[in-house]
Image (spheres, rainbow, N blue to C red):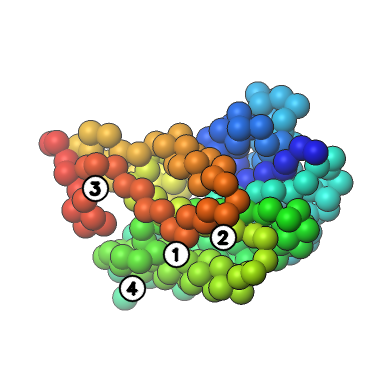
Amino acid sequence: MQRIAVVTGASSGIGEATARRLAGEGFHVVAAARRADRLDALAKEIGTNATAVTCDITSDESVAGLAATVAGLDGTLALLVNNAGGAIGLDPVANSSAGDWQAMFDVNVLGTLRVTKALLPALEASGAGTIVTVGSTAAFTPYEGGGGYVAAKHAQTALVGTLRLELSGKPVRVIEIDPGMVRTDEFSLNRFGGDRDRADAVYAGVKEPLLADDIADVIAFAATRPQHVNIDRLVVRPIAQAAQHKVHREL
């Protein structure tokens, strides 16, 4: 029976790259995100090994629809990749917007919670399920201007760690991948409200930031280890980034 993998945030960046990579690994990929046109193009590119599902992970109803679609497919749900997330702004705590913090918590933390809860019964029933959550190095290292995103990613990693403890003895692995600096088409652009100059400045002088395909490769590696092997947390940075605050730039 075909193995099914659900990837959230699959319309761009790491999610899109992961959907392609997992299809190449033999999974039937359910690509979930809000932008139907992008998902349809991706599913068409991948072919018969992909199903596009328009889903807003901040909506209980939308996530229930995703779970219903997965349940109706011919196969076994083997893998969930909680990839959808994002940052808003780079304001200091003293000037930050509670609304921005709330939006970041809703997608990074509660979105992960909603999708995990909805699909966990099927993952457990498979007898060999895996949950991969894409976090960030912000999950364990604060930085100036990152308060809301840092707090959300700390909460997300707490969710993942708690889930791993609670699933002990059950046939579901819980894996966390924490990327550092990854240059994608949209992450920083969305963070800065479409300001291309500010987005590009994040990567200025960095010879080789990570790319979405690099993280997709790591996700696929972790998800395809023998089922008794659980990679609790894997931190991935470009060689130019020694730490959150230490980045080599060739200016």
Which quadrant of the figure has residue 115? bottom right
Label 4 secondary element: helix
**Where the C terminus falls, by quadrant?**
top left
The CA span between labels 4 and 3 is 24 Å
Between residue 158 and residue 169, name the one nearer to us.
Answer: 169
Judged by depth in the image, the label closer to the viewer, 2 or 4, is: 2
Residue 203 visible in the shown view: yes
Judged by depth in the image, the label closer to the viewer, 4 or 1, is: 1
Residue identified by numbered label 2: 174
Q: Position of residue 175 (x, y in %)?
A: 52, 57
Binning the other alpha carbons within 10 Å of mark 1 as few (below 14), some (14 to 19) or many (20 upward) gives: many
User: Given the image, on which type of amino acid does mark 4 rest?
Assistant: Val
Residue identified by numbered label 1: 153
The CA span between labels 2 and 1 is 16 Å
Q: Position of residue 10 (x, y in %)?
A: 60, 42
Q: Are marks 2 and 4 in contact (CB under 8 Å)?
A: no
The CA span between labels 2 and 4 is 32 Å
Label 1 secondary element: helix
Q: Residue at x 60, y 36 (%)?
A: 22
Mark carried by residue 241: 3
Binning the other alpha carbons within 10 Å of mark 4 as few (below 14), some (14 to 19) or many (20 upward) gives: few
Q: Position of residue 68 (x, y in %)?
A: 83, 53
Between residue 73 and residue 32, name the one nearer to us.
Answer: 73
User: Given the image, on which type of amino acid does mark 3 rest?
Assistant: Gln
Between residue 66 and residue 227, name the one nearer to us.
Answer: 227
The CA span between labels 1 and 3 is 19 Å
Of the two numbered discs 4 and 1 on the same chain, state the one appearing first in sequence: 4
Residue 91 visible in the shown view: no
Mark carried by residue 93: 4
Label 3 secondary element: strand
Q: Is residue 64 above or below residue 215?
A: below
User: Given the image, on which type of amino acid does mark 2 rest?
Assistant: Val
